[in-house]
Image (cartoon, rainbow, N blue to C red):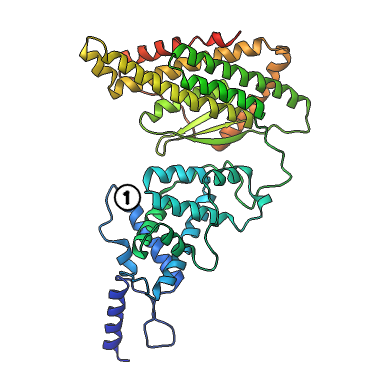
Amino acid sequence: MGKPNRKHRAAKQRARYGGADFPAMHGGAEERPPTAEEIGNAILAAAMESAQRGARGRSVQRDPVVVFTGRLAADDPLVHEVERGAHLAGQHLMTRVFRNGWLPADIHQAARRRVDDFAVSFLIDTMADAVRPFAPATVDETWVAQLGELAADAWWSDSAPHFGQWAAKHLLTTNEALTTVIEALALLILLPKLELITPLPGTARPTAAVPHHVDEKVLGRVRGLLAKAESTSFPEEAEALSAKAQELMTKYALDRVLVDDADTAVPDLPGARRMWLDTPYTDAKALLIDVVAKANRCRAVFSSAWGFMTIVGDDADLDAVELLSTSLLVQATRAMIANGDKASRSDKASRSDEARSRTFRKSFLVAYATRIGERLEAATAATIAESPEPQRLLPVLASHQIAVDAAFDTLFPQARNRGITIRSAAGWDAGRVAADRARLDQGRS
């Protein structure tokens, strides 16, 4: 074939595949269609372009499907290669994200905030597929639990690529599905590297010590107290119930510390978990989690860019922090809204407007968290003082805190304290009053 004809065929191919300049088949004059690997690379390139534009706050100017495939009909022979290419691209990025410290729950939380439900479902399936090759005994229980909560399982048949079955399940055309995949993969590209807080699939050791989770009977009592606290309309009762829950968790933790100290064969190693926060006022909500963590012998750090807290501590203490923080966030938000409703019923319209402003509400939550932290610390100190063996307990707790601090500093060597600006004195005062109404000593009969 002459040079002009080869150029003509190459131009036709670029028009067919949206402008992509795929290599010619070796040893022949005919231009060949792209392989699954080449399409997978093109999908990654399109996802990269989408991620870069998204990071700059700009929309993608070109349809990403047209960039490298053109508009595909259902019977186009290229569809099968596109399906395989989408699978390769998804597995490549998901493996990298796992290695960068992201757990299934973290990926889901980031996805539900930034992409649509179709993209979320694709990512869940991709996670399930990425974990399938590993023996169950080598997958950490955290991974198993989080994948189970997401219902991440291989529901599709292995007789055909996942992409086509997933698209059919959601009634998407090939082009719509491919655009969704690129959107999902663009999110994965944007995810930063995190601290590796849980062993990767395939690396968990079956003989490792079993984590010290809170006894289910204790958890049941604590959940019952917190459920009552969340359901009552009386702030004093709600926070007295929360204080009782904190006291119960503290007593359990102190008993466990003494037992573990006597059993030197069972190492009490600190672990880590992440808690994701919903907007608005994420920094004020992070402060509330931080004070709960301190009251339960843990350390916490806030990732403001993505909106999550990482908490370091013993597994049982982490259970306590998760339970109590989740409940107190509900109670704090309700108290904040109730304060605004109360102001709206007053005679002064200006006070009502202020109580509903962002500055007032943020100041309210910061003050609420600060005061609750003071009271939780006092309740914990009182529980320690009233324990049967306080003199034996104190050095054990000090050793435990050293281990937690060492684990935290290893994970976050660059962590620094950061203040929160308060711009509403009225909001601060209202938050302190709301927290002071919580007679935490009521829970200490």
- Asked whether 174 or 361 is in front, the reply is 174
Q: Residue at x 25, y 13 (%)?
A: 351
- Asked whether 387 or 148 is in front, the reply is 148
Residue 418: tell me if it is visible. Answer: no
Q: Residue at x 30, y 83 (%)?
A: 9
Locate residue 232, reporting x and y percent.
Answer: 46, 18
* In this view, 236 is above or below 314: above
| Label 1 packing within 10 angstroms: few (<14), some (14-19), many (20+) | some
Residue 308: tell me if it is visible. Answer: yes
Identify the amino acid type marked 1. Gly
| Residue sitting at the far left | 349
For residue 283, which quarter of the picture? top left
Residue that label 1 marks: 54
Q: Residue at x 61, y 8 (%)?
A: 445
Number of numbered tags placed on the structure image: 1
* In this view, 376 is above or below 319: above
Q: Quadrant of the N terminus?
A: bottom left
- Asked whether 217 or 375 is in front, the reply is 217
